[in-house]
Protein backbone atom coordinates (compact mmCIF):
# COMPACT_ATOMS: atom_id res chain seq x y z
CA UNK A 1 0.00 0.00 0.00
CA UNK A 2 1.44 3.37 -0.96
CA UNK A 3 1.38 6.45 1.21
CA UNK A 4 -1.14 9.18 0.49
CA UNK A 5 0.28 12.06 -1.54
CA UNK A 6 0.56 15.34 0.34
CA UNK A 7 -2.57 17.47 0.37
CA UNK A 8 -2.72 20.33 -2.11
CA UNK A 9 -5.54 22.06 -0.25
CA UNK A 10 -3.61 24.70 1.70
CA UNK A 11 -3.38 28.11 0.05
CA UNK A 12 -1.17 30.82 1.51
CA UNK A 13 -4.24 32.83 2.57
CA UNK A 14 -7.29 31.06 4.02
CA UNK A 15 -10.47 31.54 2.03
CA UNK A 16 -13.38 33.51 3.38
CA UNK A 17 -15.84 30.75 4.40
CA UNK A 18 -18.61 32.65 2.61
CA UNK A 19 -16.62 32.28 -0.66
CA UNK A 20 -16.31 28.49 -0.49
CA UNK A 21 -19.42 27.13 1.24
CA UNK A 22 -21.30 26.41 -2.01
CA UNK A 23 -20.70 26.12 -5.73
CA UNK A 24 -22.68 29.34 -6.28
CA UNK A 25 -20.50 31.17 -3.76
CA UNK A 26 -17.16 30.03 -5.16
CA UNK A 27 -18.15 30.81 -8.75
CA UNK A 28 -19.29 34.32 -7.70
CA UNK A 29 -16.01 34.76 -5.81
CA UNK A 30 -13.96 33.79 -8.89
CA UNK A 31 -15.74 36.39 -11.03
CA UNK A 32 -15.26 39.00 -8.28
CA UNK A 33 -11.57 38.15 -7.87
CA UNK A 34 -10.71 38.47 -11.58
CA UNK A 35 -12.66 41.73 -11.91
CA UNK A 36 -11.21 45.08 -10.84
CA UNK A 37 -12.16 48.74 -11.10
CA UNK A 38 -8.71 50.24 -10.67
CA UNK A 39 -5.36 49.66 -12.30
CA UNK A 40 -4.24 47.26 -9.53
CA UNK A 41 -5.55 44.24 -11.42
CA UNK A 42 -7.20 41.10 -10.08
CA UNK A 43 -7.28 40.14 -6.41
CA UNK A 44 -4.61 37.46 -6.59
CA UNK A 45 -4.75 36.55 -2.90
CA UNK A 46 -8.50 35.97 -3.00
CA UNK A 47 -8.25 34.02 -6.25
CA UNK A 48 -5.47 31.83 -4.81
CA UNK A 49 -7.60 31.09 -1.73
CA UNK A 50 -10.27 29.56 -3.99
CA UNK A 51 -7.96 27.27 -5.98
CA UNK A 52 -5.72 24.43 -4.89
CA UNK A 53 -2.07 25.54 -5.07
CA UNK A 54 -1.43 23.23 -8.04
CA UNK A 55 -4.48 24.45 -10.00
CA UNK A 56 -3.89 25.96 -13.42
CA UNK A 57 -5.71 28.71 -15.28
CA UNK A 58 -5.65 27.72 -18.93
CA UNK A 59 -6.78 29.77 -21.90
CA UNK A 60 -7.61 27.41 -24.76
CA UNK A 61 -7.12 28.86 -28.23
CA UNK A 62 -7.36 27.00 -31.55
CA UNK A 63 -3.61 27.21 -32.12
CA UNK A 64 -2.26 26.87 -28.55
CA UNK A 65 -2.83 26.68 -24.80
CA UNK A 66 -1.76 29.44 -22.43
CA UNK A 67 -1.39 27.91 -18.98
CA UNK A 68 -0.68 29.87 -15.78
CA UNK A 69 -0.59 29.60 -12.03
CA UNK A 70 -2.49 32.27 -10.10
CA UNK A 71 0.62 34.49 -9.65
CA UNK A 72 1.49 34.14 -13.36
CA UNK A 73 -2.10 34.98 -14.37
CA UNK A 74 -2.16 38.07 -12.15
CA UNK A 75 1.21 39.23 -13.51
CA UNK A 76 -0.02 38.82 -17.10
CA UNK A 77 -3.19 40.79 -16.41
CA UNK A 78 -1.22 43.57 -14.68
CA UNK A 79 1.15 43.77 -17.67
CA UNK A 80 -1.89 44.02 -19.98
CA UNK A 81 -3.37 46.79 -17.79
CA UNK A 82 -0.14 48.79 -18.00
CA UNK A 83 0.19 48.40 -21.76
CA UNK A 84 -3.49 48.96 -22.60
CA UNK A 85 -4.23 51.93 -20.35
CA UNK A 86 -7.48 50.39 -19.14
CA UNK A 87 -8.81 51.45 -15.74
CA UNK A 88 -10.56 48.23 -14.92
CA UNK A 89 -12.04 44.99 -16.11
CA UNK A 90 -15.34 43.41 -15.17
CA UNK A 91 -16.11 39.80 -15.99
CA UNK A 92 -19.67 38.69 -15.38
CA UNK A 93 -21.43 35.41 -15.74
CA UNK A 94 -24.09 35.10 -18.43
CA UNK A 95 -25.29 31.52 -17.90
CA UNK A 96 -24.22 28.43 -15.96
CA UNK A 97 -24.64 24.68 -16.27
CA UNK A 98 -23.50 22.62 -13.27
CA UNK A 99 -23.03 18.87 -12.91
CA UNK A 100 -22.34 17.33 -9.48
CA UNK A 101 -21.57 13.80 -8.42
CA UNK A 102 -20.37 12.99 -4.93
CA UNK A 103 -17.63 15.43 -4.00
CA UNK A 104 -16.84 16.57 -7.55
CA UNK A 105 -18.47 19.17 -9.77
CA UNK A 106 -18.06 20.62 -13.22
CA UNK A 107 -19.35 24.08 -14.12
CA UNK A 108 -19.70 25.44 -17.66
CA UNK A 109 -20.11 29.19 -17.22
CA UNK A 110 -20.49 31.57 -20.13
CA UNK A 111 -19.22 35.09 -19.50
CA UNK A 112 -18.61 38.52 -20.92
CA UNK A 113 -15.63 40.72 -20.13
CA UNK A 114 -15.90 44.50 -20.14
CA UNK A 115 -12.93 46.83 -20.13
CA UNK A 116 -13.25 50.17 -18.33
CA UNK A 117 -11.60 53.16 -19.99
CA UNK A 118 -12.37 56.52 -18.44
CA UNK A 119 -16.13 56.89 -18.02
CA UNK A 120 -16.98 54.23 -20.59
CA UNK A 121 -17.00 50.47 -20.72
CA UNK A 122 -17.27 48.09 -23.62
CA UNK A 123 -17.49 44.35 -24.08
CA UNK A 124 -14.14 43.09 -25.33
CA UNK A 125 -14.71 39.37 -25.04
CA UNK A 126 -17.21 36.63 -24.40
CA UNK A 127 -16.55 32.97 -23.89
CA UNK A 128 -17.05 29.91 -21.73
CA UNK A 129 -15.24 28.93 -18.53
CA UNK A 130 -14.93 25.22 -17.72
CA UNK A 131 -14.38 24.97 -13.97
CA UNK A 132 -13.57 21.73 -12.15
CA UNK A 133 -14.22 21.56 -8.40
CA UNK A 134 -14.04 19.21 -5.44
CA UNK A 135 -15.56 19.28 -1.97
CA UNK A 136 -13.28 18.05 0.80
CA UNK A 137 -16.04 17.66 3.40
CA UNK A 138 -15.51 21.21 4.63
CA UNK A 139 -15.42 23.48 1.59
CA UNK A 140 -15.30 23.67 -2.20
CA UNK A 141 -11.96 23.95 -4.03
CA UNK A 142 -11.32 24.83 -7.66
CA UNK A 143 -9.02 22.26 -9.26
CA UNK A 144 -8.64 24.14 -12.53
CA UNK A 145 -10.22 26.63 -14.90
CA UNK A 146 -10.13 26.32 -18.68
CA UNK A 147 -11.62 29.02 -20.85
CA UNK A 148 -12.02 29.83 -24.49
CA UNK A 149 -13.25 33.02 -26.11
CA UNK A 150 -15.84 33.14 -28.82
CA UNK A 151 -14.99 34.45 -32.26
CA UNK A 152 -16.90 34.86 -35.51
CA UNK A 153 -16.24 31.20 -36.39
CA UNK A 154 -17.08 29.88 -32.91
CA UNK A 155 -19.97 31.80 -31.33
CA UNK A 156 -21.20 30.78 -27.90
CA UNK A 157 -23.90 28.13 -28.43
CA UNK A 158 -27.44 29.30 -27.63
CA UNK A 159 -27.62 26.63 -24.88
CA UNK A 160 -25.01 28.63 -22.92
CA UNK A 161 -26.61 32.07 -23.26
CA UNK A 162 -29.23 33.62 -20.98
CA UNK A 163 -32.81 32.64 -21.72
CA UNK A 164 -34.91 35.63 -22.71
Image (tube, rainbow, N blue to C red):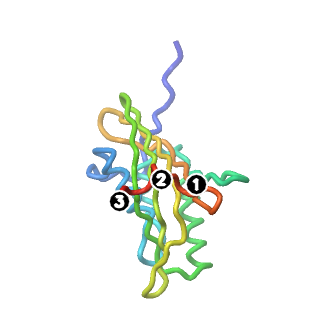
Q: Which of marks 1 and 2 is in front?
A: 2
Residue drawn at the location 50% of the way across and 52% of the way down: 129
Residue 94, position as x, y percentages in the image: 40, 59
Query: Closest to the observer: 152 or 42?
Result: 152
Q: Are marks 3 and 2 in contact (CB under 8 Å)?
A: no
Side of 69 where 48 appears, left or right: left
Near mark 2 (Cα within 10 A), the count class, few <14, some 14-19 or many ≥20, is few
State the residue position of label 2: 158
The mark found on residue 76 in the picture is none
Side of 34 where 153 appears, left or right: right
Mark-to-mark CA distance, 3 and 2: 11 Å
Circle nearer the N terminus (1, 2) = 1
Q: Do the residues labelled 1 and 3 touch (CB within 8 Å)?
A: no
State the residue position of label 1: 148
State the residue position of label 3: 164
Residue 32, position as x, y percentages in the image: 38, 62
Residue 16, position as x, y percentages in the image: 30, 53
Look at the image and tell me in which quarter the C terminus lies.
bottom left
Label 2 SS: helix
Side of 17 where 115 appears, left or right: right
Identity of the residue furthest to the front in this view: 164
Residue drawn at the location 43% of the way across and 44% of the way down: 107
Near mark 3 (Cα within 10 A), the count class, few <14, some 14-19 or many ≥20, is few
Query: Closest to the observer: 57 or 116?
Result: 116
Q: Nearer the viewer, mark 1 or mark 3?
A: 3
Amino acid sequence: MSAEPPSTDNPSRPADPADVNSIDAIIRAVYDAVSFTDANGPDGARLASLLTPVAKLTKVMPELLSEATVPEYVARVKAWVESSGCHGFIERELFRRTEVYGGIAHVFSSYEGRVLTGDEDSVIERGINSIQLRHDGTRWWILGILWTEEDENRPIPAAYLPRM
